[in-house]
Amino acid sequence: SRIVSPSQSTRELLELAGIPGDKVEVIYNGASNDMLSNKTDTDAMNKLRAKLNLKNEDKVILTVSRLVPSKGHEEIIRILPRLLKEFKNLKYLIVGEGGYEKELRNLASEEGVLSNVIFEGPVTYDRVKD
């Protein structure tokens, strides 16, 4: 049997914990080549912008992941007030679900950026790909 690690640094931590390196395989998280090689579907993009109430001039930071503390959503939310000083039309789009959503919403409210954070919820792989 083998253990899958999402990064080389996690592999090193596993090795430090006593797991032999030859039992750990690194498979990086990320987008598949077909997601990155597709041309942008302008119609689909316009429909998505309309659904999310995004203007053409809005800039978007996107995170697609489970809503758990280790994913770093809170770091983006905490820095949004500073980013908004320079980029007035900035939105943070969070795609995914998890038990940390309430805390993230509360943090966005505390930071005064709730109107700039969009919680889209879960989406299918095909919808993310499009």
Image (cartoon, grey):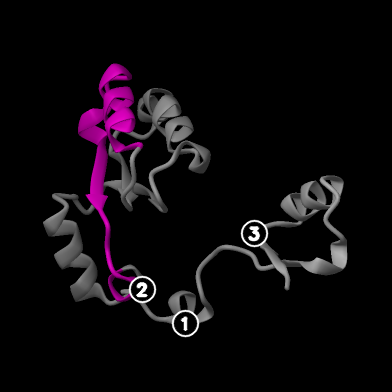
Q: Which region is colored magenta? A: 100-127
Residue bearing mark 1: 34
Image point (77%, 55%), residue name: 11
Q: Which kind of residue does numbered mark 3 sit on?
A: Pro
The quadrant in which the C terminus is found is bottom left
Q: Is residue 101 magenta?
A: yes
Q: CA distance from mark 3 to mark 1?
A: 20 Å
Which mark is on residue 55?
Answer: none
Q: Secondary structure at mark 2?
A: helix
Residue 64: x and y, percent? Answer: 40, 55
Is label 2 or label 3 in front?
3
Neighbours of disc 3 within 10 Å: few (<14), some (14-19), many (20+): few
Neighbours of disc 1 within 10 Å: few (<14), some (14-19), many (20+): few
Neighbours of disc 2 within 10 Å: few (<14), some (14-19), many (20+): few
Most extreme residue toward the top, as rendered?
Answer: 110
Q: Secondary structure at mark 1?
A: helix
Earlier in the chain: of badge 2 and badge 1, it is: 1
Q: Which kind of residue does numbered mark 1 sit on?
A: Asp
Q: Nearer the viewer, residue 37 or 67?
A: 67
Earlier in the chain: of badge 2 and badge 3, it is: 3
Q: CA distance from mark 2 to mark 1?
A: 8 Å
- Placement of 114 over or under 121, stated as above or below: above
Q: Is residue 126 magenta?
A: yes
The quadrant in which the N terminus is found is bottom right
Residue bearing mark 2: 129
**Residue 86 sits in which quadrant?**
top left
Q: In the rendered structure, are the residues bearing label 2 and label 1 in contact, judged by CB atoms less than 8 Å apart?
A: yes
Q: Which kind of residue does numbered mark 2 sit on?
A: Lys
Residue 50: x and y, percent? Answer: 12, 58
Which mark is on residue 6?
Answer: 3
- Placement of 2 over or under 92, stated as above or below: below
Image point (80%, 67%), residue name: 23
